């Protein structure tokens, strides 16, 4: 029989509010230096996150995956907190919408580079990164 791990509190929070807040066995986040996996009773930790896949292992048979943006991750006592700029459940990613967001942002960035727009470069780059991340995490390419 497979060993089960004790549950601990996990919160995945965006500026709009929590997208996951509950107990689970493990969380895996996309740290800047590589993936970070945390179980209950993990040593205290603070890390910077990059855009990527965040997976919450609610039980041995249930994993909830999110396409998450950059942010911060903190572990203390038996609580893990991931603060990210965006999180979309992989099951809810709309391929067509993500591709449309990607193309629109790329076109606006191109206009900005040609001096035909007064858009904000950083915001456009973030929109591109978010759309590409959704497509990547959902298993689709951005090609």
Image (cartoon, grey):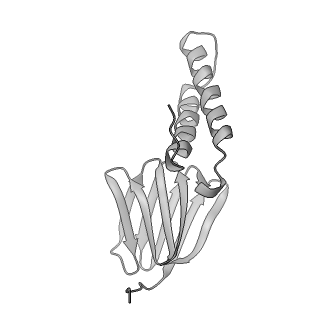
Q: Looking at the image, which is closer to me, 98 or 118?
A: 98
Is residue 10 depicted above or below 41 in this figure? above
The correct choice, above or below, for 26 with respect to 52 in the image is: below
Q: Report whether 138 appears left or right of 74.
A: right
Q: Residue furthest front?
A: 1
Q: In which quadrant is the N terminus drawn?
A: bottom left
Image-based side of 15 in relation to 78, left or right: right
The number of numbered badges drawn on the structure is: 0
34 relative position to 64: left or right: left
Instruction: Compare residues 10 and 75 and report the one nearer the observer.
Output: 10
Residue 120 screen position, x and y as percent: 59, 26
Q: Position of residue 73 (x, y in %)?
A: 44, 61
Left or right, 46 with respect to 109, comes to: left
Give coordinates of residue 118: x percent, y percent. Answer: 64, 17
Task: Tell me the quarter of the picture where residue 18 sits.
Answer: bottom right
Q: Residue at x 63, y 10 (%)?
A: 116
Residue 82 position, x and y percent, is: 50, 61
Q: Nearer the viewer, residue 77 or 32?
A: 32
Residue at image coords 44%, 80%: 78
Which residue is at the front of the view, 40 or 17? 40
């Amino acid at each position: 029989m497979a060993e089960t791990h004790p549950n601990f509190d996990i919160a995945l929070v965006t500026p709009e509010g929590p997208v996951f807040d509950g107990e689970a066995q493990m969380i895996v986040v996309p740290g800047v230096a590589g993936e970070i996996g945390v179980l209950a009773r993990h040593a205290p930790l603070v890390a910077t996150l990059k855009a990527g896949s965040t997976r919450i292992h609610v039980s041995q048979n249930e994993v909830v995956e999110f396409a998450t943006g950059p942010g911060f991750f903190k572990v203390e006592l038996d609580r893990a907190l991931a603060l990210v700029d965006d999180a979309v459940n992989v099951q809810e990613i709309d391929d067509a919408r993500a591709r449309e967001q990607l193309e629109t942002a790329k076109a606006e960035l191109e206009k900005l580079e040609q001096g035909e727009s007064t858009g904000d470069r950083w915001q456009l780059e973030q929109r591109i990164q978010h759309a590409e991340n959704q497509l990547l995490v959902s298993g689709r390419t951005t090609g």
